[in-house]
Image: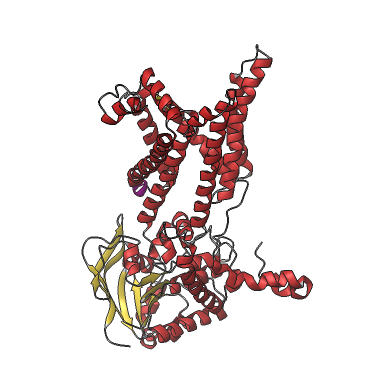
Amino acid sequence: MASDLLPLFSGAAVGNICDISSLLSRESIALAYPAISVSVWVIALVFAMLAGGIMGLVASYPALRVKEEWFLSMILLVGGETFRIVVTNTPEIGCGFNGLAGITTPFYWLSNYLPSGPLQAEVPTGLYAAVIVLLAIGCFVFAQKICNSPYGRLLKSVRDDKVAAESLGKDVSRVRKQIMVLGSIMAGLAGALYVYYIGVATPEDYIPALTFGIWVMMILGGYANNRGLLLGAFVITMLDRGSLVTGIALQSYLPTLNSNLIVYGRYMVEAVILLLLLVFRRKGLLPETRVKTKAYTLFDFGKKKAQASSPPAEAPRAGGEATS
Amino acid sequence: MTDESILRVEGISKSFGGVKAVEGVSLSVKKGSITGLIGPNGSGKSTLFNLISGAEKKNPGGSIEFDGKQIDALPPHKRSELGMGRTFQTPRLFPGMTVLENTMVAPRGQKGERPFVSPLRRRWEGQEIELAKKAKAQMTRLEIDKLYGKLTSEISGGQMKLAQLSNALMEDPKMLLLDEPTAGVAPRLAQDIFQSITNERQERGTTFFIIEHRLEVLFKHVDTDFVMHQGKIIMEDKPEAIVKDKRLAEAYLGI
């Protein structure tokens, strides 16, 4: 039992982590040792977040030196693409073009305890999907808490007017740096979770289309609205996965159909969504939200009471402070 | 009011291309005073404010001293940390935020402004409520409390001026640079704004340095006044003396 682990710990007999035999041994270890499986996963998540944070910090240096957000997005896009090409052509990093395969979900070992059949594959994956959803909820709650706090206000002020924020004593560069790091930590977490889900870490998954997909999610849901982002992510992910499943399913009924039309059709649909949004709803489906803190209770209290008790009698007072 | 000066500017200049907007200006503002700065359009008043607050870099040479410290090399937010607040001629507010949020964002060093403290509501909520009370009092005094839930991109120009003043006062600055605080504001409210300024000075000893075109209001409240013309300070005197001086009319009428 320990015989296949010992060489790993000694570090001597690891060999090439990219070849097929190490792929198989990764899978057999994941199957045999639940504790190792889960703890490696946790460690991987932590490292991914750390790596993400460091990359965010590095990326924040150009971010502080550009005057317009447009230049920043260009720099980041080009930087990301450069990084991807370097990884693709460097076998020493993550096995280069082929990517690192044989990454099983942390619950792969559960299949030992299940009757043979489709459930063996589906229960671990389903459970892992549930864990991803839980972590996503955690991230959402975290983001909501940050946004509905003085820090949320600070972020908006830096976004709206750098000069005015500075005149109020806000260290704009520091805030930008912080939020780049924070965002990249979350992206690192998402990336690690994704890799464990699809079972392979390959640079070809992170082509610019992915960036634009995420961008469409953002524009669709609405700027500065976490619920909107959730909506956008849901719609675009459903489109993405849905087109894949539909394409494959249709192929089995109509063998003459080219399923690529449907699978890749999603890019066209995304583009149409983007264009429609830019023409008709530039601010997305959901409007930007207020920074909800207790500060509003000092102002909103009287109004709410007035609306609740007797609207006609209180109408003149409430009318004066209409906020719709 | 003491004779000690809070702001001391020595021979600073600023040129944009070939235009000398500010040319060798030296002045000092007394601690706890209300000091005016007047002059025709384009005489360099706002540029001078930008140089003092750090929104623009001055030409090499000269010095700016605030509250006993050399501040020429400091970025704007550091100058603000030392207690220098300002408003802008064209109001600079945060258009995506409500009037209340604009006022609430102003105070420096809020506990909840640190990213990893912000999710812990209990750590900052007490301070938040205190600040909100202060904001409410401030906004009520400036008659913008009814607008609390409106985005600042939706309110009128005069209301923007008031919201901006409210932001600047929230920080409890030692000195406030006000760039035309009453332009676009109703005349009655203009009186009130200057009354609030006078009260603020009496209660907290705040120094005010004010650019203003409404001389009839300004001169009722200022202790001393500078006149700027073509990038230079041409006069410094009490308002009574300045209105009598021929040079004022010459500067404004271009005679």
Q: Position of residue B48 (x, y in %)?
A: 33, 67
Between A296 and B94, the one lying in front of the other is A296
Q: Which residues are magenta?
A: A63-67
Let me know if residue A267 appears in the view.
Answer: no
Q: Residue A120, located in which quarter of the rendered image?
A: top right
- Residue A9, compared with residue B226, is above or below; it is above
Which residue is found at the position 26% from the left and 83% from the top?
Answer: B4
Colouring scheme, one of rainbow, by chain, secondary structure, one colour: secondary structure
> Relative to A99, is B137 on the left or the right?
right
> Relative to A290, is B60 on the left or the right?
left
- Residue B150, compared with residue A208, is above or below; it is below
Between B244 and B236, the one lying in front of the other is B236
Which residue is found at the position 42% from the left and 32% from the top?
Answer: A33
| Magenta region includes residue A168 | no
Q: Residue B151, located in which quarter of the rendered image?
A: bottom right
For the N terminus of chain B, the image quarter is bottom left
